[in-house]
Image (tube, rainbow, N blue to C red):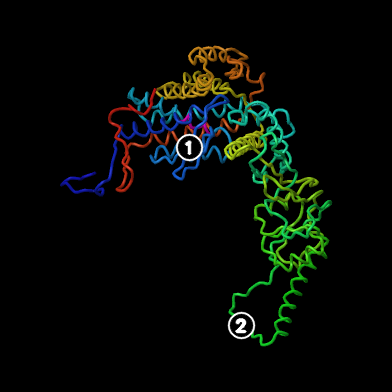
Amino acid sequence: MAQIQGGQQVLPEGSNRVLGRDAQRTNIAVGYAVAQIVKTTLGPRGMDKMMVSEMGDIIITNDGATILKEMNIEHPAGKMMVEIAKTQDSEVGDGTTTSVVIAGELLRKAADLLDSDIHASTIINGYKFATARAMLELQAIGEPIKVSDTENLEKIASVAMGSKTVGVGTGKDVLAKLVVSAVKQVAEQRDGKTIIDKDYIKLEKKKGGDVLQTQLINGVLVDKEIVHPGMPKTVSNAKVALLDVALEIEKTEVDARINISSPEQMTAFLDQEEKMLKTMVDKVVKSGANVLFCQKGIDDVAQHYLSKAGVLTCRRVKKSDMEKLAKATGGRMVTTLDDLSDKDLGHAGSVQEKKVAGEQMTFVEQCKDPKAVTILVRGSTDHIVDEAERAIVDAIGATTSAVEDGKYVTGGGSTEMELATRLRKYAVEVGGREQLAIQAYADALEVIPKTLTESTGLDAIDTLVDLRHKHEQKDGKYYGVDIYGLKVGDMKAINVIEPLKVKKQALQSASEVTEMILRIDDIIASRGRPQMPQGGGGMGGMGME
């Protein structure tokens, strides 16, 4: 509770305030503790976490962003760490754990410098210098990659899925091929650049079967059944109409009363309604369409006439699916029936209804050059399907980032070790107190190879010493932790490569949130907020090493 001269209270009763070094210690301890939670999930030998919600829902995953989202962290500094993972996930789709672990280690190293009476602003400046230099060095280390380089893209997708449960054994290679095919299919050239909109790769998941039964559909899988039993279940050489208009008699918003005083009038009224619906259907049939996807409702009478005309029809299709259908078939969305013509129709080699996991779904396949595709994710249980989906999302993000950025680097901690080696040399050039912060930044980057080593059961100190020695050599920049070979190895030789953009985003996010946390010297929690821990006693109990 804050007071000013004369004993006047500034903050309301029950407020909590933490000042100066105590505030810094508290925030650093919380940030580091969050990083420690996800640290063990890093890499192919990383462990999984089980989260149980208040409702009893269970999630089993080692995806950093998913773990932190589900944890419901209350402390403000902890929430800032969660934001890094969310940003990393939305921007590049992979490297969420890496970004949080590096941020945690940067905070720990900053705490050591603060204990040595180095001011927070000096540490922040040093970290800024180190990040800027690391970005330049990353560009120098990176190797070029194009959308046509299928082999390397498949390696990147495979590595991105390697840490997930489904990424063990042959599963990741099969899924990697599907992901790269999907990404290449939706890629478009604009102004000399390759643009990939991940939204046009639809993921549809159904439990039952095996992960290896996951398939790529060159078109769109619509989770809707055919509206009328009399309609054809399969249409070849489909001409697809996409309607954003209801095939129903619209009810006016104006209150209207119709007086019917005899059965004849009733019959005439119903006949007129039926005639209007038939006219609507005739317009669809006249366009030449033999398949119809409607975003809105379709009257039972209209369904009957569409069935008689042999038009395969699905109704109440989601807007996002309609957009994907337009991209896949080359058709155009039509908002009024009067505008519908054969020029608006899309084309697909096959449209058919199939039963998947006990549910009827409509497959729009064999499109000529679809710019929207679907991956049907399979797995034996809901937990496996969900984890397979997360793995595929990571792989799509990594592959897309590699293509759009045009560069890749080696994984297994080799890039972090190379950056650490180069930053130590740079620190000497900078001089002053900032060089201590740059050296601390370099040491913090080594947490990645160290964590990968610990997850394999190797000795972390021996491995780090060996890696430092290798990276001092002229041709040692590709050396990292060979997790399957249980040794230090050439990552390029064993095909462990990652997009440069993943590393770049992870370092930028981690350093920015660290700098933001280090600037805070006063935490004021208003009444009603959860009580925050006092930080006067150092970092005991927060798992600091």
Place of residue 135 in the rendered image (x, y in percent of width and height, measured from the top left): 55, 29
Which SS class for mark 1?
A: strand
Residue placed under numbered mark 2 in the picture: 257
Q: Considering the numbered disc 2 on the image, is that residue within a helix, a strand or a loop?
A: loop
Quarter of the rendering containing residue 215: top right
The answer to if 115 sits in the magenta stretch is no
Q: Mark 1 points at which residue?
A: 51
Q: How crowded is mark 1: few (under 14 residues within 10 Å), some or many (20 or more)?
A: some
User: Quick one: which residue is furthest to the left in this view?
Assistant: 6
Task: Choose between 530 and 118: the one closer to the eye.
Answer: 530
Q: Give the range drawn in magenta.
A: 96-103
Q: Quadrant of residue 297?
A: bottom right
Image coordinates for residue 328, horizontal then vertical, percent: 74, 49
Residue 92 visible to an observer of this rendering: no
User: In the image, is residue 349 above or below residue 37?
Assistant: below
The front one of 542 and 145 is 542
Quadrant the C terminus occupies: top left
The kind of residue on which mark 2 rests is Arg
Q: Is residue 6 above or below residue 96?
A: below
Residue 64: tell me if it is visible.
yes
Give the CA separation, mark 2 to mark 1.
58 Å
Q: Which residue is drawn at 61% across and 13% down?
A: 474
Residue 176: image location, x then y, percent: 68, 32
Name the amino acid type tagged 1. Met
Q: Toward the viewer: 463 or 352?
A: 352
Task: Please name whichever residue, 420 or 102, is drawn nearer the observer in this view of the structure.
Answer: 102
Q: In this view, does 41 lie to the left or right of 543?
A: right
Which corner quadrant of the image does residue 433 belong to? Answer: top left
